[in-house]
Image: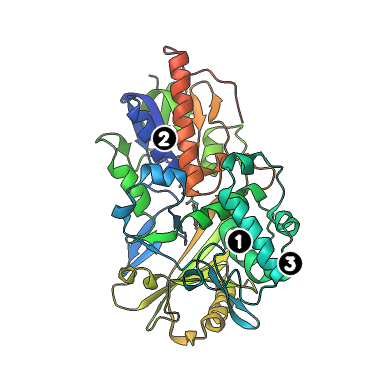
Amino acid sequence: MSGTGGACADVVVVGAGAAGLACAADLLAAGLSVRLLEADDTVGGRMRTDRIGGFTLDRGFQVFNTAYPQVKRRLDLKALRLRPFTPGVLAHTSDGPRRFGDPTRRPRHGGPLPAEGASVRDTVALGLLSARDMLAPVSWLRGRPDATTATALAEAGLSAGLVETFLRPFLSGVFLEDDLETSARFFHLVWRTMLRGTPCLPADGIGAVPAQLAARLPDGVLRTGARVAALTPDGVALAEGGGLSARTVVVATGQSAAARLLPGLRVPPGRTVTTLYHAVARSPLAEPTLVVDARRRFLNSCVLTELHPGYADDGRALVSTSVLGSPGPDATAAVEAALGEAYGADVADWEAVHRVTVRDALPAMPPPLALSRTSRFGPGRYVCGDHRATGSLQGALASGARAAREVLADLRAAPDAPAAAPPQP
Ligand SMILES: Cc1cc2nc3c(=O)[nH]c(=O)nc-3n(C[C@H](O)[C@H](O)[C@H](O)COP(=O)(O)OP(=O)(O)OC[C@H]3O[C@@H](n4cnc5c(N)ncnc54)[C@H](O)[C@@H]3O)c2cc1C
């Protein structure tokens, strides 16, 4: 192979986030030789956890849900030592805190049904929406015409009051945008997952999820610290020099890097989020509950040590708070003031221990949203990741699985040639 040299594999997968890990695992299970190249020093991509100063700090707050089909299929949940959040959320409003319960769980688990102070009309409307999302087949949800989530909530008969107090503050933390312009198809799938599953976090942080997938790979498959600079006619070239030969390359890098490696690939814009971590002498809320702000000065906040006391070595409480975008120092002070109101706490002695901004944390998902898109980009070239499905762990894993299926189908159809596929930007 010209210019790149090195070992040869049936398939090179570029990027060891959830999508690349799932794709590599499925190709290996089918008997192919696979090399998985990761630019970073470890796997996980957007699902990484750092241990800094005795704190367990995810690179951006995220929630693990047990109801994702790909999660059930691939992960040993017991080994993750999951602890659940309280179902529902606590909304900080101008009238004080108000609980928003999970309409399918008993009050002692989920608070009022569905919300403190909700009208009968809202209670019925949300109950109907929830029952349908929980019970209808996914194919039905997929097949319906798409619209924005704002439109879908209005069409479901939910009042502006309920939307502004609970649903917009909560969903903006899920979509990482607060106009509710995200696809209603995605909203219904997320709502279904939340109703059917349990939101929780692993004892070692969200990074334990990809770490478990990586631990199952045979020796010699994964190479970290290997940044792919370009795709070549017969494989990939590495930024450090040299490269790998492969008949087939799957780009599983996340949307921006994928667009660089595959010129002509269309990718959606990304959403940016910042998570602030504070260490506090005493927990400001003695329960593992997501707090949202109806005035939307922050997206969500929670006391992580109420789930896992081990997230802070020194016995203090660790509070995670996320905000849209990348706020400057002035905005951070305003967020801290809002936290003081929301928790009813004096934040003067809260220690800011860490802050992380994630660009392209999620792909934008405006309607109409195709919940799954082909990985075929061109002959011998495939692309997967959450930007080809939905911005979620489920979307990333499912996209990786789809890429593996399409690679295998093409190799079986033309075993001696690079898989021929029409370009699909
Ligand atoms: C702050 C935040 C909150 C989230 N909250 C949730 C949530 O609550 N629930 C949920 O389900 N999902 C959530 N998500 C989304 C979920 O984490 C992602 O959808 C998923 O991790 C994406 O996986 P991926 O494999 O598609 O991409 P990535 O995780 O981005 O993986 C791409 C990998 O490719 C590597 N790479 C890039 N360029 C190169 C190159 N040139 N050569 C080699 N390797 C390269 C990267 O280093 C990375 O490891 C959240 C994400 C963030 C960031």
Q: Residue at x 26, y 35 (%)?
A: 218
Mark carried by residue 171: 1
- The numbered mark at residue 101 is none
Q: What's the distance in space between the residues labelled 3 and 2, CA to CA?
A: 43 Å
Q: Label 1's element?
A: helix
Left or right side of 355 for 324:
right
Residue nearest the viewer, comparing 214 with 272: 214
How busy is the neighbourhood of tag 2: few (under 14 within 10 Å), some, or many (20 plus)?
Answer: many
What is the three-letter code of the residue carrying label 1?
Leu
- Kind of residue at disc 2: Cys
Q: Secondary structure at mark 2?
A: helix
Give me the disc on residue 23. 2
Q: Is residue 353 above or below residue 130?
A: below
Residue 408 screen position, x and y as percent? 43, 23
Q: Quadrant of the N terminus?
A: top left
Percent position (x, y) of residue 163? 68, 66
Mark nearer the N terminus (1 vs 3): 3
Residue designated by label 3: 159
